Image (cartoon, rainbow, N blue to C red):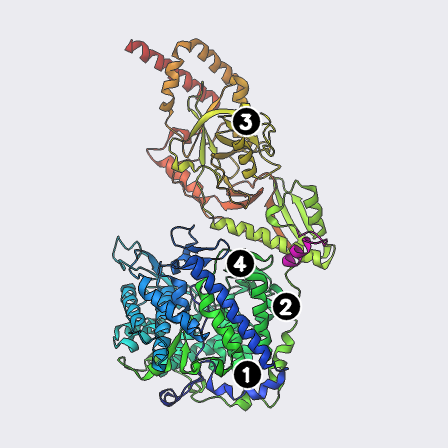
Amino acid sequence: MSGAGGGGEGGGAGCGAPAAWRAGWSLVATAALCLVSSASVLAAGAAPMSREEKQRLGNQVLEMFDHAYGNYMEHAYPADELMPLTCRGRVRGQEPSRGDVDDALGKFSLTLIDTLDTLVVLNKTKEFEEAVRKVVRDVNLDNDIVVSVFETNIRVLGGLLGGHSVAIMLKEKGEHMQWYNDELLQMAKQLGYKLLPAFNTTSGLPYPRINLKFGMRKPEARTGTETDTCTACAGTLILEFAALSRFTGTSIFEEYARKALDFLWEKRQRSSNLVGVTINIHTGDWVRKDSGVGAGIDSYYEYLLKAYVLLGDDSFLERFNTHYDAIMRYISQPPLLLDVHIHKPMLNARTWMDSLLAFFPGLQVLKGDIRPAIETHEMLYQVIKKHNFLPEAFTTDFRVHWAQHPLRPEFAESTYFLYKATGDPYYLEVGKTLIENLNKYARVPCGFAAMKDVRTGSHEDRMDSFFLAEMFKYLYLLFADKEDIIFDIEDYIFTTEAHLLPLWLSTTNQTVSKKNTTTEYTELDDSNFDWTCPNTQILFPNDPMYAQSIREPLKNVVDKSCPRGVVRVEESFGSGPKPPLRARDFMASNPEHLEILKKMGVSLIHLKDGRVQLVQHAIQAASSLDAEDGLRFMQEMIELSSQQQKEQQLPPRAVQIVSHPFFGRVVLTAGPAQFGMDLSKHKSGTRGFVASSKPYNGCSEITNPEDVMGKIALMQRGQCMFAEKARNIQKAGAIGGIVIDDNEGSSSDTAPLFQMAGDGKNTDDITIPMLFLFNKEGNIILDAIKEYEEVEVLLSDKAKDRDLEVENMEQKSSENDSENQKSEKTASGFQDLTSISQESVEENSPVSQPESLSPADGDSAHGLSSKEDSCPTENQETVIHDGECTELDNQAQEQSKTEEESSPNASWDNKVQPMESILADWNEDIEAFEMMEKDEL
């Protein structure tokens, strides 16, 4: 799959075969026809694998499929996907949202539909027949749910069409599916009509999302406000939509998909012939102007070539060749494929590659360009040998950029095509490695779990539908002989989701004219187009070591060592060394942690503003392995910060002193917590008297539970995680908690706000509200306790009106004289305090997204600013996470403050006043209230 971040590209016939071949010959869908003849030449380049070994591996693939499919049907069906760690189905709306990833889920048994034709490829016809009956009987395509047009097309519409293709094939054979009467095709047609409203734009490019029940109708649809879509999202429709038109004789689907492709072609950058990643669906302007062959664009290129194969329209091949020439001129930097700017194609747009580009060697095979396919594939294989799986993204020096791996099949796909094109048994060994890694690292009791981090071997509770739709299909076909498959796979072309469409569609229901519109837009170089198969003597000189000679220089392009994290974790169960220090566990106050950092070549620098800067010098590490651990630690620290960007950013909260003699006049700006009670959902807040916990840091069992029971506990920052403090005081019976910064002199006047994050574990058990006060604001409460002993506060999302304390004032009106005395005493006790600056605490104060921590500049050093137990200063907001801080832009916060101060409804507590002035106001208010009472009497 490709484009919006799905599974893997498929394969198909190609190689510039003339239209006559498509009409009368059985094209090779598993590899370009003209390349198969080279297999015997290259087979001598490596030791052949015995038929028995191939059969053993093929049977192993079948067993792995049964494990994954069986657990989906047992624990998840009819849900869209299986959650293999918790052995249950993923139902959208019942699980925490994962953002755009969930747009593939439509409550239509996604995995079952996506797996239909895989069952037939794996010769499981009985299971296929049962699956089709379930789909026809149970699946509802009329749900009130917003889904991705791209994902629904390639997975659901493609799955229904692929299932229909093999169903009618089995029916014609006379053994199975005799009851079948095009039910899947009718469902596909129904879904096709449901997707059509998305194309109602001036450009013809579809909206990225649509409501299955209400289409684009507002407001019921809850979508239709988007302006951008990715190139692959709009350009990966032609195979499924054209097949639907050819199967049903209804031309409208193919027409809409062609119009979208025509518009993308017209909007390409004319000087470079490249397309961007995202485009405005109304104006046609490029929104993201970087270009590559990975996520966001990939399957657009694939579908141009395959549309030519399936539909016989020469313009699609001309467009593909034009783009391919630009890709090889600018993007291809063997063995790398790097994104560039479409207007300045000689300038790289980024220094990392995403895993979806792993499909491209397979597409190059279909094009007939074998050498760069071998080079890129080998580079990717070296990365896999280092990390066991292909990380979601990795840098040009092959370090992990994004550590996840959702069991994508693109690399297996390219491995399959290279083997079919070359016959080199080396690629069978590559496939064997993939099987071993899946079983060793991804297999769990209820299926196969995606990798959360390829370096540590940690899992994620997901098994995407494309894993069953593609991975097992390509791996089985890699090891299967022709007689192992019950039908001729060469009669079909693979979609980007590896669904099977029959090549005979090219001559069926040709309701769309094949006008070549390409030359209307550009002058084409005829030498760029191959109209016949390339000479295999040129592709493969009479050298049986040809492919090996291409791979050999790339053997050491990536360090061959295994992920350190996985090895150390395994060793830790025995008598081996301990696992390396993880960024999430690091505490700057822990001497053992500091010693480990020193061993890894990581220096700790204390800055004047309280921050701690981490800098790594590999040459200062105790060994090369320690240096590698140090680099991983720095990367984890950066990624820890990146994860915070995805977490909800909360507005500041308020601590309001409501007891005598404050009566709500003092409102302290407080930092929120990402755990515990959400004060924005509890408008009344939490009110109670305060009491200091013992120990004051709150990091162990509270020894004075009788003092904090039913009260709001005060704690000092440091020594342990915020969540641990919250659990300890909650256990002691506290109704809330306030953490006071131990960094002397810190204040919300000058320091940025922040929010307290959890400890990396589930914090649902914390139900009390938690707020953070800087040192200066915290001392106001502590000093009040010294003066008045009993201090009552209100923890809330924003300051309440000062009249909330009228009832308190009524109760104490008879003690007016003593109150005035205490007020005078208060003025004396607080006279050394500076003015209190109140930040906006409005409910909807905007908070900007955090910036990622990045290495410090330097050729040989990897630097990072971290946080011990204090926070950065000046104009930046801060998120505290597990004892660390991440810097945030404070611009939105300042904007909120400016807007509120300029508003006529701005609350009084946003003003800056000296303490003496505040106390004088209190005395006047008390006297005025006393006079009102006398008047009423």
The number of discs equals: 4
- For badge 2, the amino acid type reads Val
Closer to viewer: mark 1 or mark 4: 4
Q: Is residue 335 magenta?
A: no
* Residue occupying image coordinates x 59% and y 58%: 457
* Residue occupying image coordinates x 41% and y 43%: 846
Judge the density around disc 1: few (<14), some (14-19), many (≥20) Cα neighbours within 10 Å.
Answer: many
In the rendered image, residue 389, in percent from the top left (x then y), is placed at: 57, 65
In the rendered image, residue 875, in percent from the top left (x then y), is placed at: 50, 42
Closer to viewer: mark 3 or mark 1: 1
Single out the residue that lies furthest toward the right: 622
Side (left or right) of 862 relative to 729: right
Indicate which disc, 1 or 2, sits on the residue closer to the N terminus: 1
Q: Which mark is residue 445?
A: 4
In the rendered view, tell whether residue 344 sits above or below residue 501: above
Closer to viewer: mark 2 or mark 3: 2
User: On the image, numbered disc 2 is attached to which residue?
Assistant: 558
Magenta residues span: 564-580
- For badge 1, the amino acid type reads Thr
Name the foreground residue: 898 vs 1: 1
In the rendered view, tell whether residue 811 sits above or below residue 871: above
Closer to viewer: mark 4 or mark 3: 4
Element assignment for label 1: helix
Element assignment for label 3: helix
Closer to viewer: mark 4 or mark 2: 4
User: On the image, numbered disc 3 is attached to which residue?
Assistant: 779
- For badge 3, the amino acid type reads Asn
- For badge 4, the amino acid type reads Pro
Element assignment for label 4: loop
Side (left or right) of 379 relative to 180: right
Side (left or right) of 300 relative to 766: left
**Label 1, label 2: how far apart the Cα atoms are:** 24 Å
